[in-house]
Image (cartoon, rainbow, N blue to C red):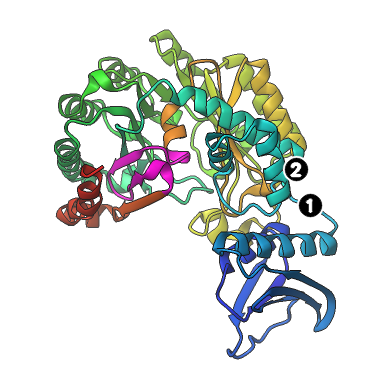
Amino acid sequence: MLNLSLKLNKRDFEYDIYSLIRAFYPGSTIKIWYEGEEEPIGDYSYQYLVEYEESSITFLVFDQNHEISRSITRISGQADRRERKNYVKKLVYKALVKITGRELPWGDLTGIRPSKIVMGLLEDGKTNLEAASLMRDTYSISPEKTALAITVANREREILKKINYKDGYSLYVGIPFCPSICLYCSFGSHPIDQWSYMVEPYLDALCRELKYIASKMRGRPCDTIYIGGGTPTTLSPDQLERLLKLIQSEFPMEEVSEFTVEAGRPDTITREKLEVLRDYPVTRISINPQTMNQETLDLIGRRHTVEDIVSKYQLAREMGFDNINMDLIVGLPGEHKEHAAHTLERIKLLNPDSMTVHSLALKRAARLNLFKDKYKEISFENSQEIMQMTADSAREMKMDPYYLYRQKDIAGNFENVGYAKLDKEGIYNILIMEEKQTIMAAGAGASTKFVFQNGKRTIRAENVKDIKNYVERIDEMLERKEAGIKELSTQ
């Protein structure tokens, strides 16, 4: 892990420059400072200097105060902010490629929605070849990732033709409780054994927020519903029924084309809870192994066995669930390609309807990051070979990619990809990732996103993450949505 310094003479595009440097040196510490500030004290492996001028940008790299690289790009005086940002990113990327001798799969693309860019190009009348050429020329994306983005964007467009997403909305419901907190998790989740006393007050506030959303959105079709978390099946059967009964009574279920419930942790799944889900119009569930290697499950704190995953999956199949997703994480601590291959072989035997492959992203709030010194001897591996293995396994199960997104600090600078069999795609995933539709969100830590102008402009309304604050400040959570709802009503 390196200690790096980044100096800028302007605050333009700081995040993009920082993200690119961090992608080339994952896990490194980067100290950012600005011209006019006192130089930070430290022994830096590399020092980067970005100088913005009226018509040019210079990127200088120093090794122990000796200049080792100087790159300059000229900027057209007519360039707008987006064009200037692309100039900067291309300059920094090419310099880092030269210094490190390696390229990134997604080039200098720092955004999380590659397929949204492609979809915009296709909607503007570009052909697949033209869109691919623009992606490579603009962002230096590899041919493999360009092809993936083009494939996903085309499939998304076909799927979205089935619903009137411009006039409708989707509903997200957050259940912030889990049986235990996984080592890599950064979500606002709470261990159920410590927070069981807050479940009923939480459901009271949540149901109030759901009634508010239903009343404000009345007259608009609700296209998809997604209950996530946390782990929704941490709730008891009676609590699950209370929630589902309210949703069914308050929202126009006859218009809902997809209703997903995350049953992610097999140690929370029981026959009684699955029976509750079957009693309501739930069309899709997710049972998430993350890995099929027991040593890794123990290390990351999953508190269940591989056989638990298999038995609960088989139980759901026996009870008639015909659209089951399974999530996997590539790059978990201590896992190599042999572990990934084992997981994929076990998943193929189960033959789920869809599979979402996540590249591990170490968020700041994850225990794996907070206590990284404790785990510094553990290796983290991801590669194009492993990502290709997941794609090949999906194809063997007759699944094709249907949505993708990227995250900050993602392992290997790769991506998260959703694969699905025909007509088994998660429509909600597409709508939220491509920002095609307003997502009304309820619950602690939930983020409502109002979408305008076909995704060109969005407004967020965030709920507080802390459960007690959410319950006590529920009136404020409702008020935070008012401005977006008011503007939405004029569309």
Frontmost residue, 301 versus 366: 366
Could you tell which of marks 1 and 2 lies nearer the N-terminus? 1
| Residue located beneath label 2 in the image | 142
Q: Position of residue 19 (x, y in %)?
A: 62, 61
Q: Which residue is at a point 37% across and 26% down the rendered structure image?
A: 260
Amino acid identity at mark 2: Ser
Amino acid identity at mark 1: Glu
Residue 449 vertical placement versus 17 (above, below):
above
* Magenta region: 432-456
Q: Which residue is at a point 46% across and 33% down the rendered structure image?
A: 430
Q: Residue furthest front?
A: 78
Query: In the picture, residue 87 is in which quadrant?
Result: bottom right
Asked if the residue under mark 2 is in contact with the one under mark 1, i.e. CB atoms within 8 Å, the reply is: yes
The answer to whether residue 334 is visible is no
| Residue located beneath label 1 in the image | 103
Q: Position of residue 179 (x, y in %)?
A: 39, 39
